[in-house]
Amino acid sequence: TAPRGYSAAIDPGSGAVRCDVRRDLTEASPSALGAAGGAVTDLEDLRRLATGIAASPSGDAVWADAVPQGQGRPAWLLAGLGGHQVGPLRGFSGIAPGFVTAAYSDPVSGLTVAVSFNSSTPGADFAGNAARALASIAVDAGAAAGAADLPALPWTAESERNATLTAHARC
């Protein structure tokens, strides 16, 4: 069974998020998403895609000219051709009506994180914040267990938690 996607309503007068009104967006037309709207996937597919994007030598061109994502964004948050580079991790994040998703992988260690949430209310960055927090937790746990070749991340789980709590609508 496919997951159902939700979003809080938006007040048409003020533009404020209406947490008391939940909209079921499951039946929204995927045609608004172009070619991406034709895909139905799961976390395992996202993991494989992120791992392939990160580690494939043929994908190196995607990262050759990665650029900062804009003023006010961290210097380690870059956009490549069809993906994001966040510190040493490579992958993507995105939003569709009712869903937010992110998946990142480290091409050296193979550390991979994939998340998907069935609410688009918090916005496009929410899944990326969650995935980066989980990557930080995984690196810290691996270091505590004596693992080698772990990526050095320019963020912490706490910094991503704080970004989530201050930047996203809470319902």
Image (cartoon, helix red, strand yellow):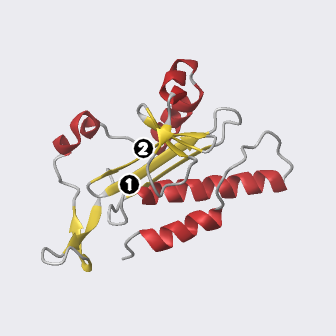
Query: Could you tell me which residue is drawn at 66 percent across and 55 percent down?
Result: 136
Q: Which residue is mark 2?
A: 42
Q: Secondary structure at mark 2?
A: loop
Check whether the beta carbons of the residues at disc 1 and disc 2 lie within 8 A of each other.
Answer: no
Q: Nearer the viewer, residue 37 or 88?
A: 88
Q: Position of residue 169 (x, y in %)?
A: 37, 72
Relative to residue 62, is residue 153 depicted above or below?
A: below
Q: Position of residue 77 (x, y in %)?
A: 53, 47
Per the model, the C-alpha gap separating discs 1 and 2 is 13 Å
Which three-letter amino acid code belongs to the residue tagged 2? Asp
Q: Which residue is mark 1?
A: 100
Q: Is residue 4 visible?
A: no
Q: Secondary structure at mark 1?
A: strand
Which three-letter amino acid code belongs to the residue tagged 1? Val
- The quadrant holding residue 15 is bottom left
Instruction: Locate residue 130 relative to residue 167 in the image: left or right.
Output: right
Instruction: Locate residue 164 relative to residue 137 in the image: left or right.
Output: left
